[in-house]
Image (cartoon, grey):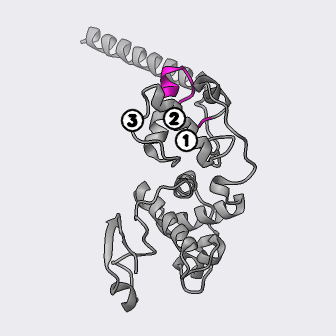
Amino acid sequence: MKKAKILCLVFALVFCAVGITAGMISFFAQPETVISADAANIVKGDTKANIKAVQTRLKALGYYKISVDGIWGPKTRAAVKAFQKDYGLVQDGIVGSKTEKALGITLTGSSSGAGGYSSSEMNLLARCVYAEARGEPYTGQVAIAAVVLNRVRSSKFPNTISGVIYQSGAFTCVSDGQINYTPNSTATQAAKDAVNGWDPTNGCLYYYNPATATSKWIWSLKVELTIGRHSFARA
């Protein structure tokens, strides 16, 4: 009986020692590299020319399998990450100076925001995405941003991001104040992806949540597709 108690005590001391050691290793370990939430996909500028240059080089190296279109989407980012992994770079999917050098390309600098929009416009678009679609699938968040941009291009709506978003009665998040919430990195990235040409809605100008929509008119629109809790329509 005494031997059993002694063995139990020994095991307990061993487990405590292992736990303390693991805790010390965790405490002194180097932190992971944190990428700023407002970092661009391409640090020098998310221009169509830069994106095409990255895609072309990645395709030549066998990392990018689809057509070069100058649109920054999930497949482009995945190709960048795969390249970074093989070349011992930080796998953040962002083409910074080290990745640019490893790719063997020279990108052009740009002082404007993504797609030619200013940083304030990009921030407003990200705030709209966050307010309207946080918690939705990522594709659904990009879709919300795409609807805003589709309206900017349409003659039926104002021709600026701020004009579209702040158009009277257009977005619930404006009327309830949620447009002023600080967007997270996911909403910021979704806005950038939409500006860079990704439109999961294929040109839709409207969206609504069937569970909460009260407008009779919105229900009269033909639904083109549904992403998460939102239905998307053209007109």
> Farthest residue in the bottom direction?
216
Which label belongs to residue 65? Answer: 3
Which label belongs to residue 56? Answer: 2
Q: Pointer 1 and pointer 2: residues touching (CB < 8 Å)?
A: yes
The range drawn in magenta is 83-95
Query: Between marks 1 and 2, how big is the CA–CA gap?
Result: 6 Å
Residue 91 in sight here: yes
Identity of the residue drawn at 46% across and 34% down: 79
Q: Position of residue 182 (x, y in %)?
A: 63, 62
Quadrant that contains the C terminus: bottom left
Q: Could you tell me the amino acid type at mark 1?
A: Lys
Which label belongs to residue 52? Answer: 1
> Farthest residue in the left direction?
1
The residue lying toward the viewer, choosing from 108 and 118, is: 108
- Magenta residues: mostly which secondary structure? loop
Query: Between marks 1 and 3, how big is the CA–CA gap?
Result: 13 Å
Q: Could you tell me the amino acid type at mark 2?
A: Thr
Identity of the residue drawn at 54% across and 25% down: 26
Query: Between marks 2 and 3, how big is the CA–CA gap?
Result: 10 Å
Q: Could you tell me the amino acid type at mark 3?
A: Lys
Q: Position of residue 146 (x, y in %)?
A: 49, 64
Secondary structure, mark 1, is: helix
Residue 41 lies in magenta, yes or no? no
Q: Residues within 10 Å of mark 3 (few under 14, many from 20)?
A: some
Q: Residues within 10 Å of mark 1 (few under 14, many from 20)?
A: some
Q: In the shown orientation, is residue 175 left or right of residue 10?
A: right
Q: Position of residue 133 (x, y in %)?
A: 47, 65
Which label belongs to residue 194? Answer: none
Q: Is residue 14 above or below residue 232?
A: above
Secondary structure, mark 3, is: loop
Q: Is residue 199 above or below residue 155?
A: above
Q: Position of residue 107 (x, y in %)?
A: 67, 36
